[in-house]
Image (cartoon, helix red, strand yellow):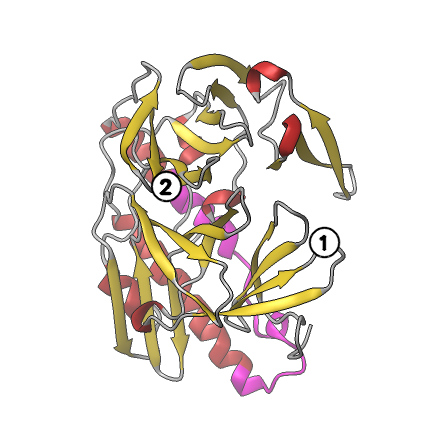
Amino acid sequence: MGDGPGELRDVDQMVARPGGGAVIVDDGHRAYLLFGPDGSFERALRFADTGADRAVSAQTVRAARDGGALFLIRSSTVTLSQGEASGATGDRTIYRVALGEGEEAVQVPFAEGWEPRPEQQVTMETDDPADVFAELGDAFAYFEPRLVFDVLPGGGVAYSDSSAYAVKIRTADAPTRVVGRPLHPQPVTEQLRERARARVLDRYEESVEGQFSAPDLGGDLPSAFQEQLLATMESMMEGMREMAANAPFMPEVPLLHGLRTTWDGSIWVQRWGGDPLEQVRFPGAAPEADEAADGWIDVLSAQGEYVGTYSLEDTRMPAAFGPGGIVAFVETDEFDVPTIIVKRLPEAVR
């Protein structure tokens, strides 16, 4: 960690380059850091300054198969600094970032996902983060469908942005087409609304009970600063609680949990399991942090035809896909020590 060339400050995401090496998204340096196959630092591309969304981080990043670009989606954020608070939510755009030879990298809109709620950006003068959550209003909704995507050979993307089983294929030189299966989402009933809201609020109470105390925030900090930081964190959590208590509901329970693609163009579509409450999370929780307890993975061919289904009990979604049908899984032992397991897929599902 540090400030010199190739040193890291605040790593947000990292992706492998197809020819070897890696691209690290460093929010501290505000740059994409490119490393070669031998681990040596090659160069940095600064984030292009786009003004209002300057502080917005990437939520998911994928590398194009030819290594010449990244595709990413942005996360929702709330920040508080020196009496100014800001928030950004609802951006459902997939951006393309060319890794050219210049000094800056610009995020260019490539595909526009369906927006269940309008995109919002708020900046205000306040010392209370709860004010931002109140201003954002309906920025959080129960059973909001995820925007999930992965790259395709030839420079396009496959993505899902709705509650339906509809995978959209977007390339640079052809109209968007939709593939899927004849499966339909279930409606959100009044009983399900009550259970979902109660689950989220119960989890909130469990998470904050005894979690925050001044000594836990840094024993080396002045006590006055500790108390101020504690008050800020408590206010932020209360703002999130109010948002969860008053959030609206989407009319349907989404079908799709995630989506990945193979190097040959097949699409692996992960469906949620049978319990809708598994989809309920507290505002601010990272969408990709929750791993489904049960569900299924459908494999679609590069042409969108149904190939077959895996149960998550038998096959988890790979952490990474590589050339020649190679996939990698990350497994942990009883001490949470990770091990990378590499396997090769059968021809039919590559």
Decide which of 247, 216 is in the foreground and name it: 247
Sequence-wise first label, 2 or 1: 1
| Of labels 2 and 1, the one closer to you | 1
**89 w.r.t. 292: above or below:** below
For the record, the magenta segment spans 199-225
Decide if residue 265 is in sight here: yes
> Mostly what secondary structure, the magenta segment?
helix
Asked if the stretch drawn in magenta spans residue 293, the answer is no
Which residue lies under the disc numbered 1? 37
Decide if residue 164 is in sight here: no
Q: Residue at x 72, y 27 (%)?
A: 343
- The span from disc 2 to disc 1 (Cα, nearest Å) is 31 Å
Decide which of 25, 104 is in the foreground and name it: 104
Q: How many marks?
A: 2
Residue 147 shows which numbered tag?
2
Q: Amino acid at mark 1?
A: Pro
Task: Report x, y in % for residue 86.
Answer: 32, 71
The image quadrant of residue 52 is: bottom left
Tell me the quarter of the image containing the N terminus.
bottom right
The image quadrant of residue 176 is: top left
Q: Residue at x 74, y 43 (%)?
A: 336
**15 w.r.t. 343: above or below:** below
Asked if residue 118 lies left or right of residue 164, the reply is left
